[in-house]
Structure formats: C-alpha cells, structure tokens
Image: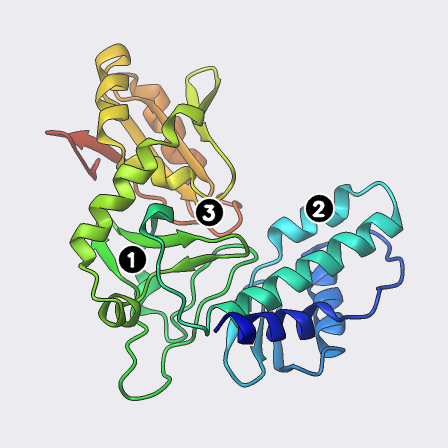
Amino acid sequence: MRLLWAAIVTLILATPVLADIAAPKNVDETLVLMRDQLSANTLITDIVVDFDESYIKFQFDGTGPHISFPDNLHSLLSNAETDAERSEILATHLQNITAGAAGSQLDAPINVQNVYPVIRHQSLGLMPTNLHADPDQNAPLEGGSDDQDYTLASFPFAADMRVYLVEDTPRTIKFITQDMLVSQKLSAQSLKQQAVKNLRELTQDLEVRSQDDLHMLAYDSNFETSFLMDDEYWDNLETQSGPIVAVVAARDLVLFVNGNDAKAVTDLRDLVHPSVNLFSYPVSTALITRKDGRWQAYD
C-alpha cells in the first residue's frame, strides 16, 4: 500500500510548472483556471465545472468522481502579491486536491484522533451526488458498487441541520461514510463521542469576535460550526452572559447574540434572511437556542 501511494503521488506531483497568472476577477475565473490546469493532467478525466454552484468535479484515474469548491483558492489568488506567487499557489493547490483524491481511494484507516463533528444543512446527506459543500475538499459520489454505502454518517442537530463527522487529514478533510464505518468496524455513536472529545482540545484556540451586540466564532474557516457541539463551552458562556440565540449562517460563520436582547435577536434574523443572505455556502437561516443544555429551534 505504501508503494502504491508513493507511486501515485509521484505521478501526481510530476506536473509542469505553470506560467505566471494574473489575479482572477471572480470565482468563475478561478474555476476556469482550475479546469484548464486539471485538463493538462492525463490522470484526470470527466472534468465538469458548475458555475451556478461554484464547484469543479473530476475523476482521478477512474476512481472518482471528486469535487472541489474554489473559495479558499480564489481568496489566496486574489491576495497574492505577484503573478509568479499566484502560479505557485495554484500549482500547490491542484497537487493537493489531486493527491487527496488518490489518497481517498486507498482505504486508509480512519485516525479517530483526527475526527471532528461539523454542522451542515440536513439536505447534505440527501443530495443525489452525496458531495459535501466544503472548500478544496473531496468526497466520493453516491453510487459505486452495489456493496458500497456512501451515505454520510450523521445525527440530528437542531432545526434543519445535522451533525456530520469528518477526518482532518494532511491533504484533505474527508466526510465519514457508512461504508467507512462498516469496513473498519466502527460505531457511529462512539466515533461521534470521540469527535466531540477531540474538539474540546481545540476549543482553547477558539476566538469570539464582537461588534456591538453581534458575536462571531472565529477559528480556521473549516471547523467554526464544530464548536456548537462543545456543551461545556456554551454552558459556561450562558452562565456569564445569559441565554444565547445563534445561527449557523455558513460553513465558517456562526453568529450569536444575547437572547434577552429582543432587538439583537431581530437584527440577527434580518441579517440571515434568505433575501439578503449572501454568505458563501450558507448552512441555515434558522435561529437556534439552548434549552436544557441542548440546541433547539428558537421559534
């Protein structure tokens, strides 16, 4: 297996140096850059760009399909100081997502110490493609062989959201599927408990940024929603500041206010109303609050 992985990575990384590129004006231009460069890799086929949903889908050497969202890449390319730096960023990104696609097919054991919970909309597990909506990451499409179940492992959370389990690996963040649990003889419930335990070791680095009465969780743009699962953290916060009303506005954006402040709650509702919610990859517009130590729909 190690030799196979080494061979695959060698093939992936043997890509030509990219010419200097200008800053993309929007995400669509970033998607075009990705498409053009992936097309040059003979191991990658069936490349499809969805400009409406802002993702690129591809197959790696017949193992996929896989999907990547370009938000993080677009931000890096836009902020790079030189065209040469942009070229290097793009090349590294493409190497990483392709290596991640290859690695996801090698049935590597789940490292339970690197599994965390994330909150997403309940429709995620029901999507026909069964693909997650996270940036620069890959997951298998639903389908495959008859004995494979790519259904995402998940649990009810609150309102229209569910808890999903992901493994944070060096190259990608992989959603845990039922097939992975069965093949590795893991219990979904016990893995969830381990994921929450792992999360609590990260909470010390969590920041809360505030502007007037509005507060926002800040971590690393990947695991902000995860911290909603740390009951001890929210119990302590409620003890200090009173009841909390929150919204999981996007995969990296958790907003909350004091539930005793009626105006703040109204402002929070207005901020994420579907007519004005322009956040990338939104999760929910439902307000939630804690009752008896658990998150529940506010209304």
User: Most extreme residue toward the top, as rendered?
Assistant: 240
Label annotation for residue 172:
none
Residue type indicated by callout 3? Ser
Residue type indicated by callout 2? Leu
User: Alpha-carbon distance for marks 3 and 2?
Assistant: 29 Å
Percent x, y of residue 157: 22, 47
For the point 75% across and 71% down, the residue is 14
Element at label 2: helix
Q: Is 204 rendered above or below residue 135?
A: above
- Name which of mark 3 and mark 1 comes first in the sequence: 1
For the point 30% across and 43% down, the residue is 286
User: Alpha-carbon distance for marks 2 and 1?
Assistant: 30 Å
The crowding category of the residue bearing disc 3, from other C-alpha atoms within 10 Å (few below 14, some 14 to 19, many at least 20), is: few
- Say whether residue 100 is left or right of residue 32: left
Whether residue 157 is visible, yes or no, is no
Percent x, y of residue 254: 40, 35
> On the image, numbered disc 3 is attached to which residue?
275
The crowding category of the residue bearing disc 1, from other C-alpha atoms within 10 Å (few below 14, some 14 to 19, many at least 20), is: many
Element at label 1: helix
Whether residue 143 is visible, yes or no, is yes
Percent x, y of residue 295: 20, 36
Percent x, y of residue 218: 48, 30
> On the image, numbered disc 1 is attached to which residue?
122
The crowding category of the residue bearing disc 2, from other C-alpha atoms within 10 Å (few below 14, some 14 to 19, many at least 20), is: some
Residue type indicated by callout 1? Gln
Q: Which one is closest to the eye, mark 2 or mark 1?
A: 2
- Say whether residue 88 is left or right of residue 260: right
- Between 5 and 117, the one lying in front of the other is 5
- Name which of mark 2 and mark 1 comes first in the sequence: 2
> On the image, numbered disc 2 is attached to which residue?
76
